[in-house]
Image: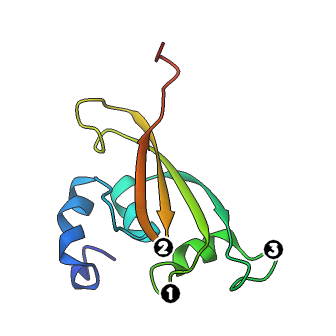
Amino acid sequence: MFKEHPELFPEVHRSPILNGVIVAGMTPFESKLAGGAFAFKVIADTSRWPAHSDPLRVMWQQSIAPDSSQIWMTFKNDTQFPNEPGTLFRVEFHDGKVARIDRLPSPQDP
């Protein structure tokens, strides 16, 4: 989708997506495109989402209509921290946008 329609994505995010780097302000969908495979945790905004809402639907909807859902995505790739290949990191979203990126300790870390 990104390759066919890059105009659908903010210009400021196009190069980071192509380079596999998640940056502040990206949506969960843009983060997925940049970061690759991920694990996730979603606590849906109860003022908008009924109980037992599909967490993936909640997460992807943030690109269109952000809300106060709490979202964390965890990635492991070679591109976010190029000098530390295979780094595990967590991305936290506020109002549907990347607000924080934290490197997580790997099993090899002391």
Residue 22 point in image, percent of width and height: 33, 56
Residue 7 point in image, percent of width and height: 22, 84
Residue, far right: 51
Residue 59 point in image, percent of width and height: 57, 71
Spatial CA span between label 3 and label 1: 19 Å
Q: Which residue is mark 3?
A: 52
Q: Is residue 68 left or right of residue 84?
A: right
**CB atoms at circles 3 and 1 under 8 Å apart?**
no
Q: Residues within 10 Å of mark 1 (few under 14, many from 20)?
A: few
Q: Depth check: 107 or 4 in front?
A: 107
Q: Which residue is mark 2?
A: 96
User: Quadrant of the image for the N terminus?
Assistant: bottom left
Which is more foreground, mark 3 or mark 1? 1
Q: Earlier in the sequence, mark 3 or mark 1?
A: 3
Q: Earlier in the sequence, mark 3 or mark 2?
A: 3
Q: Secondary structure at mark 2?
A: loop
Q: Which residue is mark 1?
A: 65
